[in-house]
Amino acid sequence: MNKRSIYFFISSIVLLSFLSCAKKGSITGGEKDIIPPKFLRATPPNYSTNFNKNEIRIYFDEYIKLKDPQKQIIISPPMDPKPIITPLGGASKYVKLVFKDTLLENTTYSISFGESIEDNNEGNPLSYFKYIFSTGNFIDSLSIKGTIADALLKEPDTFVAISLYEVNENYTDSIVYKEVPRYIGNTLDSTHFTLDNLKAGQYKLVALKDASTNYTFEPKRDKIGFLEETINLPADTSKVFNLKLFKEVLDFSPAKPKQASKHKFIFGYEGNADDMKVKLLTETPSDFETRILKDPKKDSLYYWFKPFFEKDSLTFEITNTNNFKEEFITRFRDQKTDSLVVTAKTKGTLPLHKPFKITANIPLDSINNEKISLVDKDTIEVPFTSKLDIVENEITFDFERGEQQLYKLQILPEAIKDFYGNVNDTLQFNLRTKKLNDYGKIFVTLENVSAYPVIVELTNEKSEIISSLISTKDEELLFEYLEPGKYDLRVIFDTNNNGIWDTGSFLLQRQPERVSYYPKLLEVRANWELKQTFKLQD
């Protein structure tokens, strides 16, 4: 064998060895990094006393970044203005805080980073790291803990602020609207909270779903929960406090009316407008008439009038039963007239136990059944009745509904007349029913009810009310004609017997009405009966 052959042979052996090794495994760059950053040191050191610096640096063993610092980093007591925190939008081996606020004397400060500190490469979080310091000569060490829930909904909000206000000679219930609390914490993405490094004293405990993150209560935007009694520390450190968040009903406040069309004004409002009254003070024609409708989805009233008359402006007076009175002057001019549009209020399949309803964009005035026909899928005429409700601005068509049927409701021209004498064009609605065994039903028995009446509701997974019953005694309740699906069962303790759930008020120190949820979802199947006993807790 010559030298060239030997060289070729050796080269082939080396190449085969390399390929063999390559088959056994390939280079991957090593295992994925799952280790969070490690705290190394801080200047000044963590848990420093007699703190008098305006800057803190916290060092880590690798490059880090801050994720959602505005939500995750909680400083207690709050500072105004807030400190400058870096890095933002970049990476660094340390977190720097520069204080722009004068620190309180003899106060323990807690800076909780939540899960904001992540390594720069893989985003592994250093969970719940805290930096603690005191401007006095010792660190306060008392703490409280608790849970939050929503007063009405099954699932509570996340990132709820937990506040403690000192109850001293300066405390009033209005403090939550204008001043930041003494101590602040946050549930982050859980339903539990802990407030640490507290000093002895008396406190008011408040929870806020703080939309603007300014640590003050803004009823238009925020949910609130509170403990009625005062917390005493250190005596109450072993207790677990439970807070229920709710949205207050705002005080009634109307907005300036706006003309939306030739014969219509819109009155926006805040709060409860059930007893709101609108009176036109401007001189009107002798045959002047009005009709007021409430928007079912918006906080607005629609003020309709006839006939149109010439004025540069109108003066309205708005009142309610709580002695509210205010006058508004608004421009008035000729505009486009609304055209009558009639639509179905009943959407989708027609339930076997509910009538069919239609509504309109203009107040309705009359209906003529002689120009309306209803036939089934065999074109057999079906007897029906109709009823006009001018308050809800709807027409209800009731008739005996058969299973798995098709109905055609035809409304000929001029059958419906509105407030202005406009009439409809030909309308046709095709209605479909299901078989009775396409539905399921639930029999509910309540046990351990402390007081009646109660409102018993089934809601879907979007918390929309599907069916509601009022119970005034021990009885079996029947929810029928239920679409197959999963439902939540809840009981509202209707303490004021008004048939609805009532929210709370912080200023009145009134908690919302109690709501209890059955702990599991109820699954309804077609042609199926479910019997469920709900034992309520005291």
Image (tube, rainbow, N blue to C red):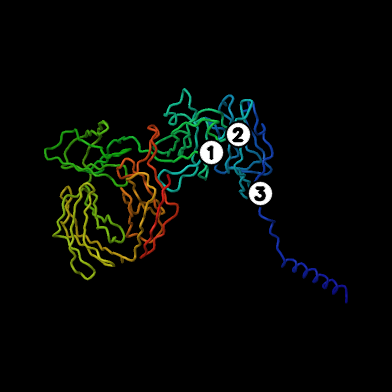
Name the side, left or right, on which 113 lies relative to 210: right
**Do the residues bearing badges 2 and 1 touch, measured as CB atoms within 8 Å?**
no
Q: Which mark is residue 35?
A: 3
Q: Residue furthest right?
A: 2
Residue 355 x %, y %: 24, 58
Q: Quadrant of residue 16?
A: bottom right
Residue 400 location, quadrant: bottom left
Which comes sooner in the sequence, label 2 or label 1? Answer: 2
Kind of residue sitting beneath label 2: Leu
Q: Which residue is identified by label 1?
A: 145
Of the numbered discs 2 and 3, the one sitting upstream in the chain is 3
- Which residue sits at x=28%, y=45%? 295
Number of the front mark, 2 or 1:
1
Q: Quadrant of the C terminus?
A: top left
Identified by mark 3, the residue type is Ile
- Judging depth in this view, the residue of 56 and 2 nearest the camera is 56
The amino acid type, in three-letter code, at marker 1 is Lys
The picture places residue 98, in percent across and down from the top left corner, at 60, 32
SS under mark 1? strand
Mark 2 and mark 1: Cα distance apart in space:
27 Å
Q: Which residue is mark 2?
A: 97
Q: Give the residue at the far left of this rendering.
A: 286
Residue at 21%, 34% (x, y): give it: 314
- Badge 3 marks a residue whose secondary structure is loop
| Alpha carbon separation for disc pair 1 and 3 | 29 Å
**Judging from the image, what secondary structure is the residue with disc 2 in?**
strand
Residue 273 x %, y %: 28, 39
